[in-house]
Amino acid sequence: SRSYNITLLPGDGIGPEVIAESVKVLDAVSEKAGFSLNYTEQNAGGAAIDAHSDPMPDSVVETCKKSDAVLLGAVGGPKWDELTGAMRPESGLLKIRKELGAFANLRPVTVPESLAENSPLRPETVAGLDLFTVRELTGGIYFGEPRGTEGEGDEKKSWNTMVYSVAEIKRVARVAFEWARKRRNKVTSVDKANVLDVSRLWRDTVIELHAAEYSDVELDHLYIDNAAMQMVVNPRQFDVILTGNIFGDILSDASATLGGSLGLLPSASVGGPVGIFEPVHGSAPDIAGQGKANPFAMILSAAMMLDTLNESDAANAIRAGVDKVLADGYRSGDLWKEGNTLASTTELGDLVKDAA
Amino acid sequence: SRSYNITLLPGDGIGPEVIAESVKVLDAVSEKAGFSLNYTEQNAGGAAIDAHSDPMPDSVVETCKKSDAVLLGAVGGPKWDELTGAMRPESGLLKIRKELGAFANLRPVTVPESLAENSPLRPETVAGLDLFTVRELTGGIYFGEPRGTEGEGDEKKSWNTMVYSVAEIKRVARVAFEWARKRRNKVTSVDKANVLDVSRLWRDTVIELHAAEYSDVELDHLYIDNAAMQMVVNPRQFDVILTGNIFGDILSDASATLGGSLGLLPSASVGGPVGIFEPVHGSAPDIAGQGKANPFAMILSAAMMLDTLNESDAANAIRAGVDKVLADGYRSGDLWKEGNTLASTTELGDLVKDAA
Ligand SMILES: CC(C)[C@H](C(=O)O)[C@@H](O)C(=O)O
Ligand SMILES: CC(C)[C@H](C(=O)O)[C@@H](O)C(=O)O
């Protein structure tokens, strides 16, 4: 029977708590669907700094490479805030993305009518929102060479390089066009082509690929500054957003505010042989260990993992379970309103497990 | 008696219309305050491409350099959209900023209680908002070398360099700290120091300057992705935002949405011998020539110009005039609501002139 090896990287803060709930739910749906999941747990981020003086030891990378998928909780926290460079928890994150060739970061954001009241925007602007960002994740200014520092005193300077090749742009653009075909058939490519050479190549490449292979998909282009405006003024105009690494970092975080809580937002980093699935929220050290964390983002990330493993029935069961628990009024503190039932991290995991 | 030479660059679209209203108002307040303004009008952007095949001819730059200040309307429009590189209207804008050494772009955003209803955010989140972005404008990835394109086919790649020196960071940080002292005494510096070398230098330099010269000002640091979130979730936490060229482009445009119309937002680009004062909105070709443009952003940019020329009484008179006209309920279409009086571009200019 079908079986998959999953590497668990709980990481820091609330990471371990939400990972535990996602495993609980995964075990339930996989049993029903007739496949099995074998877990290997490893340290990452601050936990790995503490244990191995390295936020992403090579041995952990090797374990990830040998598995079918990686579930990641969250990394970082005040304990490691004074560290710099390669010793920072975030460096571990960048390393595992790069090592696994996870060049496409997928970030769906939906705001069901029932949750529109939680939005910082007017409910009528966001109710029914359903957008999907495809962010390039292993190139651009995050990894571009040369980078460095030189000189002394006032002359000292530091630099990074924002660089993309046609091949890098095409492969991530394909991911966006393919998703658009499964959704509302529209891609908005975001760049700064009026100023940057690298954005000019980005735009030209997207236009060419579109003409050659995806002319059935509606395509338009926005400058990043305008896209950041549109995200606040009229976010429902978007279906699939395609953009580079740093612009995607900024824009997808802006989009993540629209539902009023990060606690529901999953992500998947795919494109290589092994995908990484993690919630959009961070390690939230202020509420760690108190049973207050919202496990839905992690549980929904596990559903994205199952999609990628072609276990869509189980994935859909998870999503239906989360929807039911929300519809029944159960909420963690981040989403709780008068009339809801406040529930702990483990209670919410149990409820989803039973409903899935 | 005091007299100033002003270069007018009306540019494209609604640029000439709003420039005309700002001149009308300037003439009125300068006469009352006892100084005179001499104007020289020149082409810029698309208009200059049409007239001189160059979006910012050297002769125009020379005129600007010899004047005391530059008032710019807006550049660009569909007519010039197919042009690339140095022939684009935007290149003219970048050139004049660089040539005038205007390294600090100042973008105040206020949302008076009376206009909070126009915000895409919940009125209670933005009412009373008063933030001020100081964006570095003549460095960073906009101008960094090397930049270029190389290779063929899938191997073709393009790149830009995000680079800052300590001297560049210090001079713009000083501007932010000085403004903070005149305001609510808080600076939020925005960077991506967890990923970029250039941001690490940015943060270290800001911290050092703060400790040495501005320790009376409250200082904190946000990553750009988090700042983009905070701009939507809790914008009133900000007083002065200090950031680099591209991050400032994105973040200040996000902040510009909060009042519900760009039509009220001025900007000033200063630091060199001659400042540039322009509205945040663009050339709005769709409404050009119809008397529909909101002239307030341009008129308030002219007020910022007077501040810089140390004519604060006249500057304050303009701002008081705009406030009165708004309080009296006159609005252009972008801000009009049931109960307001719809007024044309020239009517609004006349009203402010009379009220100032
Ligand atoms: C932690 C940080 C390095 C990371 C990024 O910038 O990619 C995070 O913001 C994200 O978006 O996953
Ligand atoms: C038109 C463009 C080049 C410009 C910029 O990116 O600086 C504009 O967006 C602005 O912010 O003034």
Image (cartoon, coloured by chain):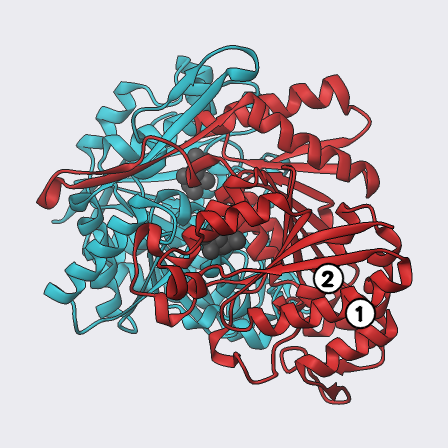
Chain colours: A red, B cyan
Question: Can residue B264 be spotted in the picture?
Answer: no
**Does residue B340 appear to the left or right of A164 in the view shown?**
right
* Front in this rendered view, residue B143 or B125: B143
Give how far apart the Cα atoms at labels 2 and 1 are: 8 Å
Say above or below: A356 vs B124.
above
| Residue A322, numbered circle | 1
**Does residue B344 appear to the left or right of B50 in the view shown?**
right
Say above or below: B18 vs A284.
above
Badge 2 density bin: few <14, some 14–19, many ≥20, Cα 10 Å: many
Residue occupying image coordinates x 54% and y 62%: B258
Say above or below: A191 vs A48.
above
Residue A167 is situated, as x and y percent measured from the top left of the image, at 58, 22
Give the position of the C terminus of chain A as an image quadrant: bottom right
**Does residue A294 appear to the left or right of B176 in the view shown?**
right
Judged from the image, the secondary structure of the residue bearing numbered disc 2 is: helix
Q: Are marks 2 and 1 on the same chain?
A: yes
